[in-house]
Image: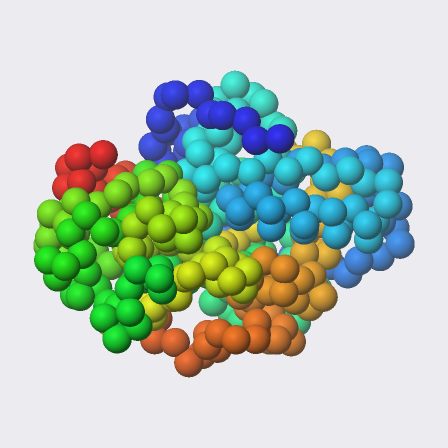
Amino acid sequence: MTRKSTPRRLTRRHVLAASAAATGAVFVTPVRAAPPEAQKITPALIEAAKKEGKLAWYTSVDLPVAEKIAKAFEAAYPGISMKVERSGAERIFQRIGQEYQSKIYNCDVVNSSDAAHLIVWKRGGMLAPFVPEDVARYFPAAHKDPDGMYASWRITLAPIAYNTKLVKAEEAPKGYADLLDPRWVGKIVKAHPGYSGTIMTSTQQLSRDLGWSWFEALAKQKIMQVQSAADPPKKLALGERSVMADGTEYVVSELKSRGEPIEPVYAVEGTPLVTGPSAIMARSANPNAARLFTAWSMTAAAQQMNVDVGALRSAHPLVKERPGRPKLADIKTLREDAVAVADQADAIKVRYTQIFKV
């Protein structure tokens, strides 16, 4: 069941203040001599997790994907019930901040499409160190926290896309500059960085590499503005708009695989790359179930399921790419900078709102 957040909006600084009040933490990133020892899935861990019998997973991955992952975990470990709390990344960030302010600690494992959220929570002392064996053994350094607080549970891209019934392939935009062509006035849909972690991350990359002037020009194209990064592909599939300026690749891939008239475009300028890390909350009420789920979710088998049933991408080198789409290594991507997002997010929201008046 997905719950709505309360209306009050919290900044990154507010979340740090809330975590400090709840934990006594200071506003510095904890420094460890070394990450904790890698943890295997052992009979003792499974038994301890089954004694707890449940866990709550806060995630921003699209709900059908989240539910498939949860059911697979429950099937692998009978006796453990998994509660999925799915919402947009920014709403999850707001909710956890509000819960900490109220000394409510419902979340056991958190996944966000905005890696900057994990940095903020780490700075606030809100995460528990835990390194699954597969993360330690296989994941590249760029996809795991050096202090063992989180790792990339998923990777996605934020491409352009178009409706193949409304736009001919030869006339489709090839990059971001093409979206400014007058032919696309009133025909573009776009998600909002104030609600979506994927779009916050991509907005930071595009504003850095193309400049805010590109957004100012795009705003003149009479954009349909939606919230979640999962929404623009769905609007395209319904034929409500011809082109999307951004959105999440895995929803594009899923819709295309079901025969919907949608085609991704990996921009000539480069496509924003977005990691979605997972972590265990330091005040988890079910720490063993949280460890078991986190360790299981990072295995090659579980990561392969992310790709096969969720159309996500993975940092695990043993995972095979989804057939029928380009390999990640063959796509020109923009550089992700989660630290910059963590520091700039509040200013990005203000600037974006001023430009698009939403």
Q: Percent from the top left, x then y, of residue 264?
A: 38, 66
Residue drawn at (36%, 39%), measured in percent from left and top?
Answer: 227
Taking 3 as reference, is 53 above or below it?
Answer: below
- Could you tell me if residue 291 is visible in this image? no
* Farthest bottom residue in view: 330
Residue drawn at (78%, 38%), measured in percent from left and top?
Answer: 81
Q: 20 or 224: which is nearer to us? A: 224
Residue drawn at (56%, 21%), measured in percent from left and top?
Answer: 103
Q: 169 or 92: which is nearer to us? A: 169
Taking 251 as reference, is 288 above or below it?
Answer: above
Q: Quadrant of residue 204?
A: bottom left
Q: Percent from the top left, x then y, of residue 128?
A: 61, 44
Q: Percent from the top left, x then y, of residue 90?
A: 41, 38
Q: Percent from the top left, x then y, of residue 16?
A: 41, 33
> How many tags in the picture?
0
- Could you tell me if residue 225 is visible in this image? yes
Quadrant of the drawing holding the N terminus: top right
Residue drawn at (60%, 50%), measured in percent from left and top?
Answer: 65
Quadrant of the drawing holding the C terminus: top left
> Which of the colour schemes (rainbow, by chain, secondary structure, one colour) is used?
rainbow
Q: Quadrant of residue 243?
A: bottom left
